[in-house]
Image (tube, rainbow, N blue to C red):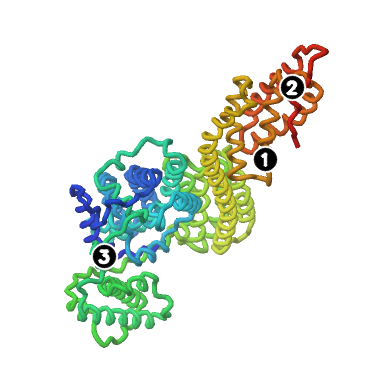
Amino acid sequence: MDTPFPNISTEEFDALVAQQNQAPAQTGSAGMQTSGVLGPSDNLRQAMAWSLELAPQVMTNMVSRALQSLDRKLVSLAGAAPAQMLEQAAVAMEEQRMGWAKQYTPLLRMAMAYPAPAKMAAILAQVDLRICAQEAAQLDALVQAQGSRRSNPLSAQAYVQALLELINRSPASPELRKIWADHLLPALSSQLAWVYLQLQAVLRDPASRETSAISQTDGFNEQAAIAFGFAETKDDSPAGHEDAGLDTQTQQLAEQARRTVLRLQKHLGMSAEDGDALAQALSGNPMDALLHDLDLSEQLMAKIRERGLPMPSMDESLDHLHAATQLNTLTVPVEEKAPVPEVSEEKIAELLKSYRNTTSPSLQRVPVPLQEALEDLKLPLLSLAHQEPALLTDDQHPAQKFLGLVTQRSLRYSSEMAEGFVAFMTPVDKLITAISVMPQPSSRVFEQAGTSLSTVWQRQDDAVALEESRKALEQAQMQEAKQLAGRLGFQLVGRKDAGDAPPMIKQFLMGPWAQVLARAQLFPLQAGDTERYTQVLAALLWSVSVRRAAPRKNEHATLIAKLIPQLKAGLQSINMPDLQADPLLSDIKKLQEAVQASVVAPDADTSISDPAPLLA
């Protein structure tokens, strides 16, 4: 991928990290007024804290995946000049691994509380985050449901912002940092899918994890309040002055650099619409726009020289711009063209092996059925590689993107027996079978196959997200009903007709049936649920009372035949599993049978007993 790589507000981060390390005062980070501010819920605080706890592992995993990607490219470029630069990048990245794992957490913490300006949106749009799309959507829904007052600070933007800032702080050359970004950013999506699953569990049930140590550190509460929109930063915060101090000369130089870029693009036959979104995002900050356009103009001039075209005439040279801004811009030398790679069955086998050996953060590998299915693509890939040798070296080639798409998606499933694997594998298998019998598949075939699978998976993800949303709503309703049930239970056992009820029945009233009535009052499934289940309660208490029901055994037998199904319907309304409900109903039946078996004198006066309650 062609990763845009501007300077991401290093000074702002340094100022914020310095404030984080200071002792807490009456105001929070960046001048935030914290006294008397109602902060985010503990669920949100713990989710943010655990995202920071997991950050070192995320960074370590990203480096591992990036090194694997670099190794694959080195194999395909063996002996070529660009391979030397890639090898230097891999060695330098390995050296940075331990330091990055420690540095990533504080940068991520700042990125969550203080998001980057508009230019980050342009960068984020160029990062492939499809692998974690479902988990990100589910997490975002949970964060908003917990009461966050602003966009989700746990989103991918914070992770990308912190990662680019981490890379940008390295003293390595711009060429090496560019290579790092190109290989680290694609590895981020699968890591976020893993992280977001953990955070969803924390938001649904904070007790599922112990309290994070980070949440107890100085300044964390203030930053969490800012991140979730419960506190505001003053206008004099570090993030509030990107354009401060820019003079007229800087504005003029920025405009001149933009005109130069447009001339060069026109000379290369590029329309104005071909300009990248990053330049538009930077237009509000003349200094950043100037730096970006100077870098872009160097790249365009290199393309003109590479094509053997004459240089267009310029009103003012780029050298004048560099001198005026006193910038030491490094001109990246034009890399030698890589030789056409050798196409062979062994090369195709190595390519497929690199994707079959893809692992998840838990070292889980691609499921065996998909590994076997990928073998059927050997001949189609070999045929295509003879027509398009770039297939072997370019990880953005449609065929390689297709392989990456299906293997990364497969890592959601621990084995072929995992839930949802069949639904995943069925369309993949059909497409691979169709491609394998084509005499001469083109790259367009793989592109369309990837698009088709993405569409199918999006529908599946939407259905899962809808079901997750329904379950989350139901869980929230049940939680509210449980709180009401705690109060209703005491009222039920205090009823006059519950005085002679057996202990088992009183426990039943305090627990399950109180929840049934609470659910009926708050979230009725049908009109009249509250009245119906109140009648069932009265009928139940009468049916287990020897004093009141034994003299009226005929009425009793008729009533209990209708009562048991309605008791079961009530328990089903609170989603009680049959394994729990059936033993309860069995115990109630035994008490009712004891009433039927009780001995009553033939001349017993039925006037002292109560008639059977009404039961619809």
Q: Residue at x 33, y 46 (%)?
A: 52
Which quadrant of the figure has residue 586? top right
User: x%, y% of residue 596?
Assistant: 76, 18
User: x%, y% of residue 172?
Assistant: 23, 57
Within 10 Å of the Cα at label 1, are there few (<14), some (14-19), or many (20+) other Cα atoms?
few
Q: Which of the two discs, 3 and 2, sits closer to the camera?
A: 2
Q: Secondary structure at mark 2?
A: loop
Q: Which residue is mark 2?
A: 609
Q: Residue at x 72, y 29 (%)?
A: 564
Q: Amino acid at mark 3?
A: Asp
Q: Amino acid at mark 2?
A: Ser
**Vertical placement of residue 13 versus 305, above or below:** above
Which disc is residue 531 wearing?
1
Q: Depth check: give the residue in front, 203 or 193.
A: 203
Q: Which of the two discs, 1 and 2, sits closer to the camera?
A: 2
Q: Residue at x 43, y 77 (%)?
A: 273
User: x%, y% of residue 317?
Assistant: 24, 83
Q: Earlier in the sequence, mark 3 or mark 2?
A: 3
In the displayed structure, does residue 488 sit left or right of residue 598?
left
Count of all numbered marks drawn on residues in the image = 3
Q: Depth check: give the residue in front, 368 or 493.
A: 493
Q: Which residue is mark 3?
A: 235
Within 10 Å of the Cα at label 2, are there few (<14), some (14-19), or many (20+) other Cα atoms?
some
Q: Badges 3 and 2: C-beta atoms under 8 Å apart?
A: no
Q: Earlier in the sequence, mark 3 or mark 1?
A: 3
Which disc is residue 600 wearing?
none
Q: Secondary structure at mark 3?
A: loop
